[in-house]
Image (cartoon, grey):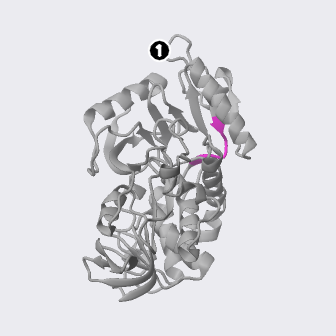
């Protein structure tokens, strides 16, 4: 065993999973953003389309943004046909990726409960279950007793502020280890020849008339045959540098984890009324989140009143957690579109494509976002799954309003 492969000599950060090259003067394709979507796009450009002269440009370190700052929930039980299509495709990819990438990133299909606390919740939830079934998505409606069997620690007493009247349940949903997902995709893409260029901020775009032919970066100009943006909360900043505007707003989204505890929480529970979602990570931390902060901003931190509110909500649903200690909190930067659905496709600038607007649903869509974005960049035409999510829908009015199915935040 060489020193490079001996675990005793490996660095703490897994740079050894991929090369860390200097940028070349030119690439066939450049992907801006080294998060989950950017890495997956590069992987599928190489794997599905044979484009191996590809660079992913990341202004910080690989997967250091939202990819490492989310709460790892994976599900596909969205209301509208277009959303169900792209998220269910992602879930099917998730189910095969550990074997395909040869990397155990702890994908755990423990199911997701979306609680109903009012009669209106019940009506909306059963509607979504029926829509899911019509689209081939596994979904069930559970009454209160059935919810208690799935999650015995949940408070289903009829005497609480918002009693649990039932819940939707998607058995195939679950969680995965987010940073390991990024490392798995990056290692596989690197082996196919993709360059990951870290500490390389895109500061502008090279143009030939109205056509983008490369990017200006903090490490010099780089030419490209095609350019794709997958920069989440900073997509609007990049769009302005390219000369157009995106209909998205960036908000902080915060979450927290507790100290390590023995396994007590068997699934994922989400409640829009009490306003919290809770799961238990593989190591034992309780992972909690709520909604986005109301103000616009790019800070990767949270506000105490939001944390206080989601902890109170968690204790209301799970009295057993009352004495749990918070270990740490953090924030991500989510990009929210007017209809709570993503934007994937051509921009008004020729040869420049964008993948943004996922709001709080980006992690769960990582494989399908990468697959469809790669198809669009490689062929110049949208994949059938991302065609409805074109930027033009905000002019035509063909919106895909998923505010309800986005639940609390994930």
Residue 167 seen in render: no
How many marks can you see? 1
Q: Say few, some or many: other residues with alpha carbon within 10 Å of mark 1 (under 14 / 14 to 19 / 20 or more).
A: few
Residue 300 placement (x, y as % from top left): 29, 51
Quadrant in the picture for residue 21:
bottom left
Residue 355 placement (x, y as % from top left): 47, 61
- The residue positioned farthest toward the bottom in the image shown: 25
Quadrant in the picture for residue 349:
bottom left
Q: Secondary structure at mark 1?
A: loop
Residue 271 placement (x, y as % from top left): 50, 30
Residue 158 placement (x, y as % from top left): 56, 12
Residue positioned 29% across, 67% down in the render: 241
Tell me where the magenta segment starts and ends, as one range. 169-174
Q: Answer above or below: position of 165 versus 50.
A: above
In magenta segment, residue 218: no
- The residue positioned farthest toward the top in the image shown: 159
Compare residues 54 and 199 and report the one nearer the observer: 54
Compare residues 321 and 47 and report the one nearer the observer: 47
Residue positioned 33% across, 37% down in the render: 326
Q: Is residue 233 left or right of residue 189?
A: left
Residue positioned 70% across, 45% down in the render: 137
Q: What residue would you read off at disc 1? A: 161
Residue 270 seen in render: yes
Q: Is residue 39 left or right of residue 335?
A: right
Compare residues 279 and 301 and report the one nearer the observer: 301
Residue positioned 63% across, 69% down in the render: 100
Q: Answer above or below: position of 53 versus 15.
A: below
Compare residues 297 and 248 and report the one nearer the observer: 248
Q: Answer above or below: position of 120 versus 181.
A: above
């Amino acid at each position: 065993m060489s020193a490079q492969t001996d675990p005793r000599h490996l660095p703490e950060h897994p740079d050894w999973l991929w090369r860390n090259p200097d940028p070349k003067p030119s690439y066939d394709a450049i992907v801006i953003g080294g998060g989950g979507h950017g890495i997956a796009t590069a992987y599928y450009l190489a794997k599905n389309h044979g484009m191996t002269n590809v660079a992913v440009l990341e202004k910080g370190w690989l997967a250091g943004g939202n990819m490492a700052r989310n709460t790892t929930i994976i599900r596909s039980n969205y209301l509208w046909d277009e959303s169900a299509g792209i998220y269910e495709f992602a879930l099917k990819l998730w189910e095969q990726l550990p074997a395909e990438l040869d990397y155990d990133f702890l994908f755990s299909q423990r199911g997701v409960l979306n609680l109903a606390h009012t009669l209106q919740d019940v009506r909306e939830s059963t509607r979504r279950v029926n829509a899911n079934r019509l689209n081939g998505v596994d979904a069930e409606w559970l009454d209160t007793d059935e919810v208690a069997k799935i999650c015995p620690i949940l408070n289903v007493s009829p005497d609480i502020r918002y009693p649990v009247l039932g819940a939707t349940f998607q058995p195939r949903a679950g969680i995965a280890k987010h940073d390991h997902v990024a490392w798995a995709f990056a290692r596989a893409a690197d082996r196919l020849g993709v360059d990951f260029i870290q500490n390389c901020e895109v500061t502008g775009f090279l143009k030939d008339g109205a056509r983008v032919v490369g990017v200006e970066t903090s490490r010099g100009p780089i030419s490209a045959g095609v350019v794709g943006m997958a920069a989440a909360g900073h997509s609007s900043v990049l769009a302005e540098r390219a000369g157009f505007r995106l209909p998205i707003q960036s908000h902080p989204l915060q979450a927290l984890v507790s100290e390590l505890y023995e396994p007590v929480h068997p699934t994922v529970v989400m409640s829009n009324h009490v306003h919290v979602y809770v799961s238990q990570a593989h190591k034992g931390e309780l992972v909690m989140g709520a909604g986005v902060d109301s103000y616009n901003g790019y800070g990767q931190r949270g506000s105490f009143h939001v944390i206080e509110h989601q902890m109170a909500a968690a204790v209301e649903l799970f009295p057993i957690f009352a004495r749990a200690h918070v270990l740490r909190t953090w924030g991500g930067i989510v990009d929210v579109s007017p209809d709570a659905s993503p934007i994937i496709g051509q921009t008004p600038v020729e040869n420049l494509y964008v993948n943004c607007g996922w709001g709080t649903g980006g992690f769960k869509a990582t494989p399908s976002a990468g697959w469809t974005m790669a198809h669009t960049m490689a062929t110049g035409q949208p994949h059938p799954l991302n065609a409805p999510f074109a930027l033009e829908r905000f002019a035509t009015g063909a919106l895909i309003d998923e505010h309800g199915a986005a639940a609390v935040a994930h």
